[in-house]
Amino acid sequence: AGISCAHRLAVLGHNITVYESKDKIGGLNEYGIAAYKSTNDFAQQELAYILDIGGITIETGKQLGKQINLEDLQQQFDAVFLGCGLATVNKLNLDNENISGVIDAVEYIANLRQTSNKDELMVGKNIVVIGGGMTAIDVAVQSKLLGAEQVTIAYRRSKNIMAASEYEQTLAKKHDVQIQYNVSPKRLLSADNNVTAMEFDIMQLQNDGSLMTSGENITLKADVVFKAIGQKLVTEGLTDNSLELEKGRIVVDEHRKTSLTKVWAGGDCILDGDNLTVSAVQDGKLAAISINETLRQGA
């Protein structure tokens, strides 16, 4: 979303500075898409094309809440666009979640995309992936391609509610990934501080739409457990109390304008977004048009 907004504003004749927390720009296109889906350095080729128009300055290693903050940005610039995504992963909230072998799926995918030597990555024999979205599918299929023997996705709801599309679920099954529906994480089993298995409650759907345990459980053998149960906004650096947040995301209007006079936002960090790259690009486009109009009017 940030690069999309920067590109359109630069085309419209504005000077743009993009702040990126990592040492390479590209966001989820660079770090978050499974390596088997996006090849030949596609993200960087696309960025090179965009930056070639000129007028866009990139500063890497600048993270909200550390090297920069929202209040200072509002003072320094005529307009600010937040395309910061959802930078942290939800926890399982189990007692021994920090044992060896329990890994954030998002971080693993990012490391896989950036490493030049895939032999350095941990590849388990028996893998359990907890989650039901695209990230769960990506890390499961990627694990199979890297040589894992048994990979099971464990999702707490039914097949038709799963966030991953029917196509993605079929893709996983074609790669011999098992999908276990209606199971909720109960506890991690370990030996010598290494995960050995995971126990799940079997869930039942109630008439009111809620889920309750059936009283039965299953245990899946695992030397690696991937957490892919969603991400959330890091609010550090978004310290202005008048920035409206709801359900842990930034509230925007139809022009992607926030509650702050000089601040717009788009991508995964905004409320009611659908977490798709194409939608983030559209958010950047709409915000850029609104910013341009606002600056033209001298507001």
Image (cartoon, rainbow, N blue to C red):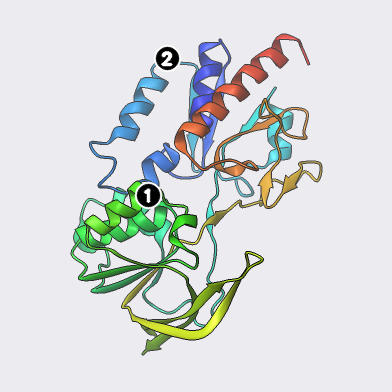
Callout 1 crowding tier (Cα within 10 Å): few <14, some 14–19, many ≥20: few
Task: Residue under label 2, please give it.
Answer: 53
Secondary structure beneath dot 1 equals helix
- Decide: is 240 above or below 218: above
Residue most extreme to the right: 242
- 93 on left or right of 254: left
Spatial CA span between label 1 and label 2: 39 Å
Callout 2 crowding tier (Cα within 10 Å): few <14, some 14–19, many ≥20: few
Name the residue rendered at 71%, 40% in the picture: 251
Measured as percent of width and height from the top left, residue 5 is found at: 54, 25
Measured as percent of width and height from the top left, residue 293 is found at: 68, 13
- Quadrant in which residue 146 is drawn: bottom left
The amino acid type, in three-letter code, at marker 1 is Glu
Nearer to me, 186 or 119: 186
Task: Residue under label 1, please give it.
Answer: 166
Q: Is residue 237 visible?
A: no
Secondary structure beneath dot 2 equals loop
- 162 on left or right of 196: right
Name the residue rendered at 50%, 26% in the picture: 4
Name the residue rendered at 29%, 40% in the picture: 38
Pick whichever of labels 1 and 2 is earlier in the sequence: 2
The amino acid type, in three-letter code, at marker 2 is Ile
